[in-house]
Image: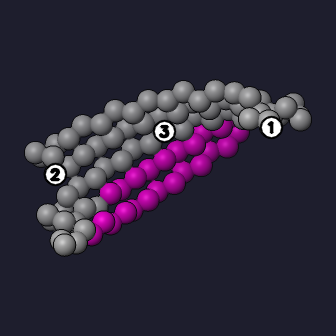
């Protein structure tokens, strides 16, 4: 990019339980950017956890957490997602 240089490294591990009705995932990213027009850098460690369950045949529910950790700040995000599929 024209504004910054840096790297993002990450990984993800997932596992199915209960014959595929429950899925769990853990993920991690390490972000390290340096901005060209200033001496500012951005260093973040981002971790997440997702749990997804098939409640009924066409309905699923996902609970997610993502934490962003910087040297002086912490951010936490929580999400709940409901999915309803329709037969055609």
Q: Quadrant of residue 73?
A: top right
Left/right placement of residue 69 relative to residue 21 reads right
The residue depicted at 37 percent of the width and 38 percent of the height is 26
Task: Read off the residue under disc 2.
Answer: 21
Element under disc 2:
loop
Res 80 visible: yes
Q: Are marks 2 and 1 in contact (CB under 8 Å)?
A: no
Q: Which residues are magenta?
A: 62-84
How far is mark 2 from mark 1, CA to CA? 44 Å
User: How many residues crowd mark 1 within 10 Å: few (<14), some (14–19), many (20+)?
Assistant: few
From mark 3 to mark 1, how far is it between C-alphas?
25 Å
SS at badge 3: strand
Residue at the (44%, 50%) spot, across then down: 65
For discs 3 and 2, the disc positioned in front in the rendered view: 2
Cα–Cα gap, marks 3 and 2: 24 Å
Q: Residue 9 vs residue 88: left or right?
A: right
Specify which label sits upstream in the sequence, 3 or 1.
Answer: 1
Tell me the SS state at disc 1: loop
Identify residue for label 1: 3
Verify whether residue 64 appears in magenta: yes
State the scheme by which the image is colored. one colour
Q: Residues within 10 Å of mark 2 (few under 14, many from 20)?
A: some
Q: Which residue is tagged 3?
A: 47
**Along the line of sight, the residue nearer the viewer: 30 or 73:** 30
Along the polypeptide, which appears first: circle 3 or circle 2?
A: 2
Mark identifier at residue 88:
none
Place of residue 40 in the rendered image (x, y in percent of width and height, measured from the top left): 82, 34
Q: Nearer the viewer, mark 3 or mark 1?
A: 1
> Which residue is located at x 39 percent, y 62 percent?
80
Disc nearest the viewer among 2 and 1: 1
Q: Main secondary structure of the magenta part?
A: strand
């Amino acid at each position: 990019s024209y504004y910054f240089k840096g790297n993002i490294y990450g990984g993800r591990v997932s596992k199915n339980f209960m014959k595929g009705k429950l899925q769990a995932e853990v993920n991690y990213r390490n972000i390290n950017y340096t901005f060209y027009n200033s001496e500012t850098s951005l260093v973040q460690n981002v971790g997440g956890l997702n749990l997804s369950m098939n409640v009924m045949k066409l309905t699923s529910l996902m609970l997610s957490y993502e934490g962003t950790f910087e040297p002086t700040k912490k951010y936490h995000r929580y999400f709940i997602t409901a999915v309803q599929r329709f037969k055609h």
